[in-house]
Image (cartoon, rainbow, N blue to C red):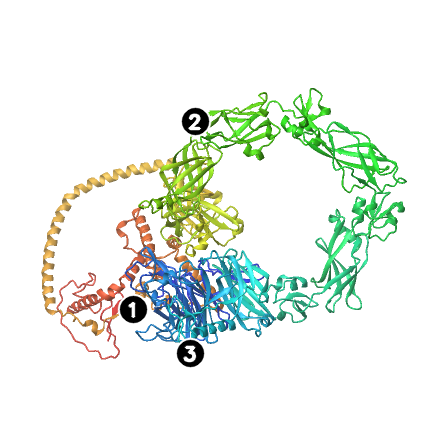
Amino acid sequence: MLPTTELCTMTHAKKFGFNSLGVACALLLCLFPSCHSDDQIVTEFRDDGAHLFNNIEVNPSNGIVYVGAVNKVYKLNPNLLTWNAVITGPFPDSIKCLQGECKYEKPLTDNFNKILLVDEDRDWLIVCGSIFQGVCEVKDLNNVSRIVRKQDSQFVAASNATASTVGFLSKGPYQQAVLVVGTTVATHVIDGRIDVSQYWGKIPAVSSRTLNDTASIFDFAVKSPPPSDKGTFVHFQRGGTRYELTYPIEYIYGFTDNDFNYLLTIQRQSLEVGTPYISKIVRFCQSDVEFNSFTEMQLNCGDYPLLQAASVGPLGKELAAKYSMSANAKVLLGVFAKSSSSHSGIPVSDAALCIFKIYDIDKTFNQSHQQCNEGYGSSISWISSLNCYKSVSDSLCKPDFAYLNGTVPISSSPTATFTDTFLTAVAVNSIHNDTVVFLGTRNGTIMKLNINSPTSAYVYDEVVVDAGSPVNSDLNFDPEQQHLYVMTEYKLSKLRVQSCYGHVTCSECLGARDAYCGWCFTDNNSRCSMQGECLAGDWVYYRNSYCAAIDRVEPQHLQVTQKKTLKIYVSNLPAVERAFICVFDVGLRHLETVAVKQEGGSVISCSTPDTDRLIATLVPSLEEEFYTTKLAVRVSGNDVDIVSTNFTFFDCSRYRSCYGCMENNFGCTWCTSTGRCTHNPDQYCEDRADNVHSASSVSVGQHRGSLDCPMIIQTSAEILVASGEYLQLLVGVRNLLPALMTSYDCQFNIDGIITETDAYLNESAETISCESALFQYSRKVDIVKAPFAVVWGIKKLPLDDKNPVDVTVYKCSEMAALCGGCLLLDPKYHCGWCDDGTCNTQKQCLSGPWFDSINGTICANPVITNFSPTSSPLEGETVITIEGSNLGISFDDISPYVTVAEQPCNCSAYRDLYVPASRIVCSTSRVRSITSGDIVVLVRGDSRYVATSTEIFSYVDPQLEGIYPTVGPQSGGTKLTIAGQYLDAGSSVKVFIISQPKDTAGSDSRVEKRQATAVEQSCSVVYQNSSHLICLTSEAKGTGSAIVQVKFDKAVKNLLGIPFEYKQDPYINSTASSLENGKGIGGIPSGGLKVYVQGYNLDIILSPKLRVILGNRDYKSDCVCLNSTLMVCDSPQFPAAAAVLGERPQALEYGFIMDNVFSLLNASSQQEALGKFTLYPDPVVHSFSEVGQIKKYKTDYLAISIDNQCEVCNQEDFFKVWIGQEPCNVSSVAATLINCIPPAVQPGRDTKEQYPDVTVVVGGVRKYVIGYLQYDTEDLLLPIWAIILIVTVGVLLILVIIIVVVKYCMNMSESEKEAKTMRQRFDWIEMQVAAECKDAFAELQTDVTFPSEDVSGFGILFHDYKNYALKVLFPNELNYAVLGDIEVEDETRRPVINKALSQFSQLIDNKTFLLLFVRTLESDKYFTMKDRNVFASYLMVALQGNMEYCTDILKTLLADLIEKSMQGNGNPKVLLRRTESVAEKMLPAWFTFLLYPLLKDHVGQPLYKLCVAIQQVIDLGPMDAITGEAKYSLSEEKLIRVQIDYKSIVSTNCRQSEIITLCVISGLFKTSM
């Protein structure tokens, strides 16, 4: 049994039962769940391994959280800290065979968690996955690593990633505990076709599985003996039609109530393909042993047919009463969606929430059974095909008729509907008589609803949990109902059910209408809280209480220079012991004054702040006439407002006109004599009788309101004057005071220059006349506005001008430069054309005649400046746009006087497009042959006014020559290029792709051939010139070849002989960062990583792109198709990502832009198997730390320090290192280090520095210059004197060698004589040894006795695999540390250590890390031979569970060792003999692991016999009791080399329990007696 704690690298070593490596594991840190800044999100849990989460369960007794994910199951504490986790995949598996032996290939297959259930009664965690045909196992609730029960022969869950599986615990027949399961038939691609597994028959659509603690666990609760096929299950009916393939049933939710089990599904209304998809509810009795009570009913929610999620929960008292139910009675809630079409099961983003009373559901089921007993109804079509018949049985659980299809639907009206919202989850809770519903969305949001009535609800809060990631349908409350666990694809969040803490005022708190929240009134800290948290105050709830509120303030506003006492009338004022204060929020400052509560308890008095403080605070805002502050009442010492309202401070002196002074509610007065607005006329006005008082002013006077202000009345709508002309102005006035106002002047602001003239008041005092003034400006603009004012008196006080009077000054010459434009100006300007070629008024036309549009004169010199298009097909009807000047004043001036290449051009159809004098639109006529000519316009048919084009217009015959590409996807969007001649002819070019009619070529019926019509798809033109057309194809109705057709206006051209072919849209099966073993894809903000895409029909896309979504932006990069099944893309650059990414990677949605194949645009969200795009932070390359950043190169490798979190940045050439102008070959990349092999010779320098610079290029984009490299050879340069000395010594050495060689040759002859004598002696010795061996062999032949064949029965004992491996790996140890548990002083640190070791295990599974780890250790001079042996042994322990990976690592290390031994001073002869490296130590251990089955099953017994035989042979001869030397020995060192006479002596030893070791070979086997 495995221990509780799972530690690093042990996930692959379950055969051993190991707990710890004992090597550096305790030094690693674990990763804690991240905390969210949102006050409603308490904590979050992610797995850096990016496992897709499938299911979540919360233990209701202790709040422990269990998460089922792809390839993993987690046990988390209530705060989402990891307590335990176990790997559940991937494992080798094939849909064609069972777990175990298989003749088919078994690729590594991900295990999707399908069922995750907590069984409190047995302390079980039931886990079902998608691999091994969907088997289940029971794990220990306290330790998910421990398997309690497992049954490999019972297939329960769906065996692929997408097929649905719903399971729940219930009671079964005979009160046994059962697992109720609804399973969608899982389809697979088998031998090139879509089919089901051959074992699908063992997985019924619905079944009840026993949980008895026996070997039959997960078998059917009841199964009738053969030949009956009955039991607690239902199958698809067997027959010719395979309904399991044509009639999919998706299971959404399941629950149990009273004595019944219920399942909710989505399925077609009938077996016929094309019928609409609907939702259904299934019911059957818990005690039914044959599922005869299995009944389906349609479930309706208004116009929303597709159920997405469901939940059973209680109703609050208020809502329960409206349903005529008791408080906390349970109901079924479901979220439904509309269908994308009448026959589709694809939901769209329109959703509804419906509530169903379980009592009504049961009542409808019972009515359907009663109708069937009366003979009305039929069976469920996918199970059987029978009709109801009359029966007297009234039993619901043992009916006479089985598998009833109910005819009466269960319906409910939507309680709430949502537009453009896709709901994915629902949960309900009751609090304070309210019913609160939590809804999850596809966008990663939780919506909170308060339900008022069966048809009314409102959303009072939304929380973004994981933007862009769908909320899983499993929403779970904690045991206290205070938190909600929300799971998205890669994140689990713990949310508070309430948002009380985000409201700072009572009105905000109660206004939120959050059923959990109320306002807690206290002296110290009033706040929004839950009722249980308000222990020392009054708690106000929004349903039955009200916040304190200010009814009114007297006065309502105040002059800023005054200080007064305010009376604040407050309703519902709470009773508090401390004193009140008033707080005025002015900008960012709070001004406090003392408040007094008056008798009666509803009025509070407080003074306004001191005027000096107030004005000083308001200075930045005093540009306005008034300023509104917040006036709040608080308890002294408390920062929370009890009540607040707006209070306005005003300043009358800021109003600059009488009208503005009057049009407010502040009671201001206008002092006419001084031209000032004031709040105190007694103090600031000189002549009080002439003052004007506002309607709200308390001052007394005859002038009141804005209508009594002295003002100008504009007498005309617009005043026009040409620049350079004089104008005398007369304006109306009102309310003038002749006694006070004695003199007047008119002021004009003409382009910034003030002009003043005398003004005179007429006798009636109703108009003022201004003397004539010259209006003139110099700027080259057409119009200038000149503001006008009338001032009076010495102070030049202006009269009010409610509607300001402006004089419009204009220049005709700036408004139009040509004759035609001039004559078309508005007659109000009185502009005309002068003979000198200018546009002016008649007064300013000094030479020659002047005429305007009124006299009907034609402008001379009409001109055509340009026209388009420049050519037309012979068939004509090309629409030409002609632009120029003086081309007539009206349409009749030019129609029908336009010719094109001497052919008439029809203008009558384009009258509305004619622009007088400047534009003519007409269509060309048909011609017979190619021709060209001028465009001529004859104004009014008068030959004196002729406009001729400077360019030629041509009639041409367009020709089509070819297309590229010749294939494209059925969805369209292909950028099709058409080559040819004169392709820019005409005004309207349209391209069509026409598919040929099918199935008519071989028909004998001419009628059929005539009726067969081609299918025409448009191709939108995006570019056009004379030789090329580019268009975008549209979606086709089918695949196949088609003809390209181009219409040039009325001309139709077909491209024959080169068809365009529509092919099936591309499909993507997988994406990876490497073609070898890469799984996930990712990138960095700088881009440059390779993404390999596999699928089919990929090469039909001309310019595919990879699209990654970050935030609300798309980031794209180009892809290249290598063939039809493989495409490679560069990861895009994310310029803005570095600032928002932080230190943690992000999982992003991605897709592919492949023309109009929109199904791949969001591929990752539509195909879960593709995973997400992981965006990692940019790797950071550190500069050399040496002085001057100059690093000396001494060893074989150059080590560069980096910070690299990117797990996929191990592609070839992703990191490039340059030394000067030459590359440094990168050999390995790890999280903190890059190793590269520099050139043998120091490269040239590309800078002025002394040494070549070292540049690291990341992803081909980002460059780091980290320093300079100095080759160590430079230190070896010697001075001249040393070189001379070395040469001298070398010459002397050569002379000595020559002398030695001569001496050697002289002695050679003597040596040869001695060698001959030695050979003769050796021959004699060899003869003697041969004779001795012959005698010894004969002696052995007569004396030896071989062990019998049944010696194994006597006691050959084989070590088990664990002890066998341990004796090989650790031969000198008795107590194996690897089998011991980790000693932890503080048990609270055990989860931390477990997590750390788990992370270290993942690092060991990273090839790059492990290789760098080994090489780094071996390069350490303090890493001794003993350390290498121990490290290699521990490493083989960690890797023995994945021998393929282990072999790959060993092969790489041996290749490095071989290469190293062949280079430099290495000696290949001693390779694998000295065991000085980790690889050499790993090699025998690798052989040991692989040879165990061979030794045990085949070689062990012969080896044992050989061992016994050798021992017997040794015992036949003499043996030295002291030295151990023997006559017959396999060891040359222990061989007795002299002839000894000996005889056998028999010794008897009577000690008991003597253990006699017969033979031990490498710790493999032994026997004892």
Q: Residue 214: horizontal and vertical position, in percent?
A: 36, 75
Residue 912 badge: none
Q: Residue at x 65, y 22 (%)?
A: 837
Residue 1451: tell me if it is visible: yes
The circle on residue 930 is 2
Circle 3 SS class = loop
- Please say if the residues under marks 3 and 1 sit with CB atoms less than 8 Å apart: no
Of residues 1254 and 1205, which is closer to you in this image? 1205
- Left or right: residue 44 versus residue 529 is left
Percent across and percent down for residue 906 are 53, 30
- The amino acid beneath tag 2 is Ile
Identify the residue under disc 1.
Answer: 1360
Furthest residue in direction top, as rendered: 848
Q: Determine the secondary structure under disc 2.
A: loop
Residue 492 in view (yes/no): no
User: Which numbered disc flags the more N-terminal residue, 1 or 2?
Assistant: 2
Mark number, residue 393:
3
Residue at position x 65%, y 68% in the image: 543
Please report whichever mark, 3 or 2, sits nearer to the chain's N-terminal start. 3
Distance between the Cα atoms at labels 3 and 2?
93 Å
Q: Vertically, is 670 above or below 1285?
A: below
Of residues 1439 and 79, which is closer to you in this image? 79
For the residue pair 1290 and 1426, the one nearer the viewer reads as: 1426
Neighbour class for label 3 at 10 Å: few (<14), some, many (≥20)?
few
Residue 272 vs residue 468, the one in the foreground: 272
Foreground mark, 1 or 2, reads: 2
